[in-house]
């Protein structure tokens, strides 16, 4: 497939890029600094800005799918920057008639009890609250889209570099934990789950999650 990957040089985006290339996909990598990406025959690296709606729309044209690993982590106002950016990603995907939009979500909006999201628990780290709230608002925006063929993949509570095992569990809107009560996934296996979804299309117009 021809896949536009927004944020291809980021923490999760770089893992998704590696997984896409390992499966033979051709990637239009949309990043702030294309010179930071290693040259690859299957990668077209383009400078991109989610705040430039017209430019982003043009870059999404002609792609079989769009994966957004965009985040606002580096910005001083993470929440507002991310929400405005994801609105533009959604609008650009619609205008470009992208067949699919897959979005990197957060764990904060997953339920730990009926009606109680992880982000709303007292234990949720304040340092991650803005990012998690942005991802929750992105999910609400996507759920209001009836014409866009979207999917969001939320990671486990802890996502970190590790091994690519290909062995994990999938869930829907509830936080997945293991026998010891831990919720975790490697960024490599998160990328496997994301590209699996790209290829298999099992969670159309819905959110799902992955964890060990």
Image (cartoon, rainbow, N blue to C red):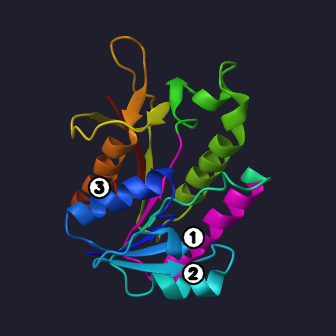
Q: Quick check: 159 left or right of 188?
A: right
Quadrant, the C terminus: top left
From the viewer's side, name the closer residue of 187 and 142: 187
Which span of residues is magenta-colored? 79-106
Mark found first going from the N terminus, 1 or 2: 2
Q: Position of residue 168 (x, y in %)?
A: 26, 34
Mark found first going from the N terminus, 2 or 3: 2
Are the residues flagged by discs 1 and 2 in contact, CB closer than 8 Å? yes
Q: Position of residue 121 (x, y in %)?
A: 66, 22
**Label 2 crowd (10 A; few <14 / some 14-19 / many >=20):** many
According to the picture, the residue beneath numbered tag 2 turns out to be 56
- Numbered tag placed on residue 197 in the rendering: 3
Q: Quadrant of residue 173?
A: top left
According to the picture, the residue beneath numbered tag 1 turns out to be 89
Relative height, residue 29 to residue 118 (above, below)? below
| Disc 3/disc 1 C-alpha distance (Å) | 19 Å
Q: Is residue 93 magenta?
A: yes
Q: Quick check: 103 left or right of 195?
A: right
Residue shown at 52% from the left, 64% from the top = 7
| Disc 1/disc 2 C-alpha distance (Å) | 8 Å
Q: Residue furthest right?
A: 76
Relative height, residue 102 to residue 121 (above, below)? below
| Disc 2/disc 3 C-alpha distance (Å) | 23 Å
Q: Quadrant of residue 190?
A: top left
Q: Position of residue 38 (x, y in %)?
A: 40, 69
């Amino acid at each position: 497939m021809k896949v536009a990957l927004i944020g291809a040089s980021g923490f999760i985006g770089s893992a998704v890029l590696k997984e896409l290339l390992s499966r033979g996909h051709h990637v239009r990598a949309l990043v702030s600094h294309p010179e930071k990406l290693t040259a690859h025959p299957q990668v077209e690296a383009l400078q991109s800005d989610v705040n430039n709606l017209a430019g982003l729309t043009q870059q999404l044209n002609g792609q079989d799918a769009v994966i957004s690993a965009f985040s606002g982590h580096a910005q001083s106002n993470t929440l507002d920057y991310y929400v405005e950016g994801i609105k533009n990603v959604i609008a650009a995907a619609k205008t470009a008639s992208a067949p699919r939009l897959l979005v990197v979500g957060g764990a904060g909006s997953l339920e730990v009890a009926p009606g109680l999201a992880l982000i709303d628990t007292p234990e949720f780290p304040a340092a991650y609250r803005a990012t998690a709230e942005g991802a929750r608002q992105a999910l609400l925006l996507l759920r209001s889209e009836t014409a866009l063929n979207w999917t969001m993949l939320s990671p486990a509570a802890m996502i970190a570099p590790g091994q690519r095992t290909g062995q994990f569990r999938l869930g829907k809107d509830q936080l997945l934990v293991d026998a010891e009560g831990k919720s975790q996934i490697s960024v490599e296996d998160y990328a496997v789950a994301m590209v699996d979804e790209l290829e298999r299309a099992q969670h159309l117009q819905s959110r799902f999650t992955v964890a060990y």
